[in-house]
Amino acid sequence: MDKSLMQQISLVTLGVADPARAKRFYAEGFGWAPVFEMDDLAFYQMNGLVFGIWDKAQLAEDMLRPAAAPGSIALAHNVASREAVDAAISRLLAAGATLLRAADAPPHGGYRGYVADPDGHAWEIAWNPAWAIEESGAITFAL
């Protein structure tokens, strides 16, 4: 198999209006610390990929396309219990998130709610009892 076409994601970068505000949000809301940062960007080492925030005007310039509002996409942060969903949502709201959907039990099982970060990027905070979360934070999809 051509390793350049492997099924994987290396980096997810969100364009943000105010990088300092975004760094505070991810530190206070999720408790994340960047592995590298400059005034206009920060990179966070995740479990198998890197998550980045970058000044949205500079990201748009780098892509050679206009900056757009957050679209129809949701990032997910899975936690180990139903109670942890509520606790994470509360912490994120205190850090500046906006509640999109209060936590509830979807028809397919588990428990989830949605918040938007200060730039409007949607985050699902979820607990799925069938999905194993390793100590590293890696998750395994299971039905």
Image (cartoon, rainbow, N blue to C red):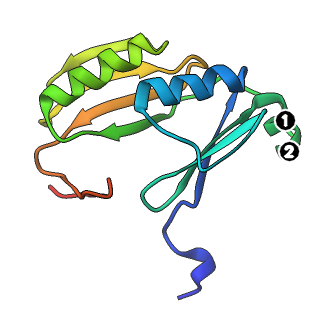
Q: Pick whichever, 18 or 32, lies toward us.
A: 32
Left or right: residue 141 versus residue 68 is left
User: SS at mark 1?
Assistant: helix
Q: Quadrant of residue 31?
A: top left
- Residue at 26% in and 34% down: 126
The residue identified by callout 1 is: 58
Residue 112 against residue 49 in the figure, above or below:
above
Q: Which amino acid does label 2 sit on?
A: Asp
Q: Do the residues labelled 1 and 2 touch (CB within 8 Å)?
A: yes
Asked if residue 58 lies left or right of residue 92, the reply is right
- Expressed as whole percent of the image width and height from the top left, the position of residue 125 reads 31, 30
How packed mark 1 is, by other alpha carbons closer than 10 Å (few <14, some 14-19, many 20 or more), is some
Image-based side of 96 in relation to 94, left or right: right
Tag of residue 62 = 2
Determine the residue positioned at 12% across, 36% down. Answer: 109
Quadrant where the C terminus is found in the figure: bottom left
Across and down, in percent, residue 139 comes to 28, 56
Q: Which amino acid, mark 1? A: Gln
Instruction: Give coordinates of residue 35: x percent, y percent.
Output: 60, 50
Q: Which residue is drawn at 52% across and 88% down?
A: 1
Q: Quadrant of residue 110?
A: top left
Q: Which residue is drawn at 51% across and 58% down?
A: 49
